[in-house]
Image (spheres, rainbow, N blue to C red):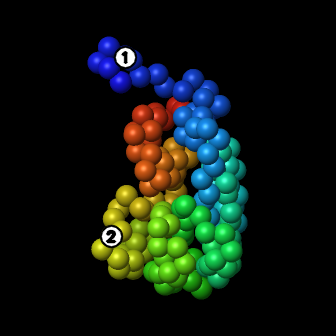
Amino acid sequence: MSSTEVERFPENDEEMRQAILPNNRMESILIVDDEIMIIRIMEKFLGDYGFKIISAQGGKEGLNRFKKTPTELVILDIGMSGTIGSKLYKQLKQVSPQTKVLFISGNPLEFSEIDNPEINATCFLAKPFSRLELLNQVLFILNKSELSSNFHADSAQ
């Protein structure tokens, strides 16, 4: 972009979808959480932006679905009952080491259980979070940080 060009923000939802996923490129996301309402909200919102969504209620189901269909991104609740987040993370990485993971939790202290030095705070989102925060994190993790930094709060609301 030259110094005389003015960057134009998407004017509507369809333009934003095209900016996020140009050329009908559908990136897949697996959502793993034990709260069905959280899953449904993320499915609807991210699906509306053109992402292919697979969901699982709980760690065991999540790992089984991931083994059948590895995705570019996993949104993983690390505080699910009956599941140890760090163990599930390691199992996912054994199946597909290049898959990116966004950890979510209602208790930010749970993030400390993930003992991998490659993981940093940009891979974590504390509940409750807004749709804009979720979209920005997803875009950032999928190496679209140049897009996520351009969206303002009104765009995703």
Spot occupied by residue 68 in the image (x, y as percentages of width and height): 68, 74
Near-viewer residue (52 or 2): 2
Near-viewer residue (128 or 98): 98
Q: Amino acid at mark 2?
A: Glu
Badge nearest the viewer, 1 or 2? 1
Residue 5, disc: 1
Q: Tell me if residue 52 comes above or below residue 97 in the rendering.
A: above
Q: Is residue 156 in view from this perspective?
A: no
Q: Amino acid at mark 1?
A: Glu
Residue 118, disc: 2
Q: Are marks 1 and 2 in contact (CB under 8 Å)?
A: no
Dot placed on the residue nearer the N-terminal end, 1 or 2? 1
Spot occupied by residue 118 in the image (x, y as percentages of width and height): 33, 70
Spot occupied by residue 2 in the image (x, y as percentages of width and height): 32, 20
Farthest residue in the top direction? 4
Q: Could you tell me which secondary element the residue under label 2 belongs to? A: loop
